[in-house]
Image (cartoon, helix red, strand yellow):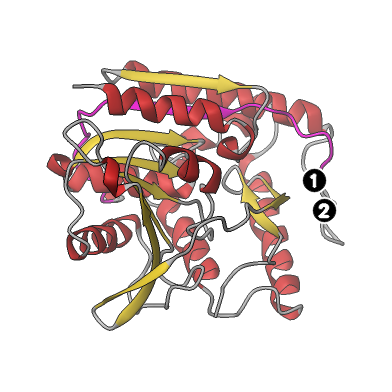
Amino acid sequence: MKNILTQKSRWILFGLSICIWPIFGQNNTSQSDFIEIEGYKYEYKLAGMNHLNEKNHVVIFESGLGEDLNSFNVVYDSLSKFTPVFAYSRSGLGNSEQNNVAPTPLNSAKLLQKLTKHLKLPEPYILVGHSWGGAIIRTYAGHFPTEVKGLIYVDPNDFMRNKEERDRKWLDLKIDPKVANEFIEDSFKVYLKEMMASGKIEEKSGILLELDETTKFHKRLVEDRQLGVEPEKPMVVFAGLKIPETVPPVPKGFVKPWKDDAEFFKVKNKDRVRHLTEWMLKLNDCELIFSTNASHYFHYEEPVLVIQGIQRIINLK
């Protein structure tokens, strides 16, 4: 069964536990297929293999939390005209069957490796990850560095920050981090109950399993997240700084700990710029691109920039 919040409209956790946000999913523009690994069937699509050569490596897409293989459709379809592209739905997402393994970034990376080996996709790959997918491609590159040519992070989550670092935005807003984090967690639980009661999310869906895993993941110290070694690979990072015009209502019985939404997003963006800049300065051969015309779904709003970033990695010798 297709584990998706709705067919045309999805509610996602925007910016990793910041607020609930409605977005519109991209249409399915290419046909998918299935592959069986260890008794479970996984949905995937593969295109552009006729363009495979020493320069054009396979580009692999990792969608964000709860998203299926269609998340990158516009970018996927455009790239398939001149380079090989591969996308798939992780366990319990899209039309993929739910396996019996916890969806940690390491387990997801190992599943991806099994898929690519079974399909005999030649290495090295260019990995593209959105949001939670960023943690997965970082883990893949950290554990299988020889299989990776480059990394593209599309508005990645804070997989490189401990709780104290993530709480800086609350301190900048003069809000008690404990109060803010409890508001986020408790109000989101109410939202999930409403979604399950309405039948829009199944009680044991892949979305909920991934959400549970992200919560556990961010409670661990960075060194305990099994990210592997720091990959010495070229990378491009995209981050959306667009301030939303409207904010969804808070569940009944809850009060936001911040008073002004616009100020909240400004402080959040400032903290994000600071964090990503600090991260980039520790690495080599990296590009960091911000856009005030894009939000968390950067690849929906700025697909050309994402395509250009991937082309940069493709053109490297």
Q: How crowded is mark 2: few (under 14 residues within 10 Å), some or many (20 or more)?
A: some
Q: Does the magenta stretch include residue 29?
A: no
Label 2: element kind: loop
| Residue that sits furthest to the front in the current view | 50
Q: Indicate which disc residue 102 carries.
A: none
Asked if residue 191 can be seen in this view, the reply is yes
Q: Residue at x 73, y 67 (%)?
A: 190
Magenta part of the chain: 226-247
Q: Is residue 246 magenta?
A: yes
Q: Which of marks 1 and 2 is in front?
A: 2
Q: Name the residue under label 2.
A: 250
Label 1: element kind: loop
The N terminus: image quadrant: bottom right
The C terminus: image quadrant: top left
Q: Residue at x 22, y 62 (%)?
A: 119
Name the N-terminal-most of marks 1 and 2: 2
Location of residue 35 with respect to 234 vertically, above or below: below
Q: How would you classify the magenta stretch by its main secondary structure?
A: loop
Quarter of the rendering containing residue 263: top right
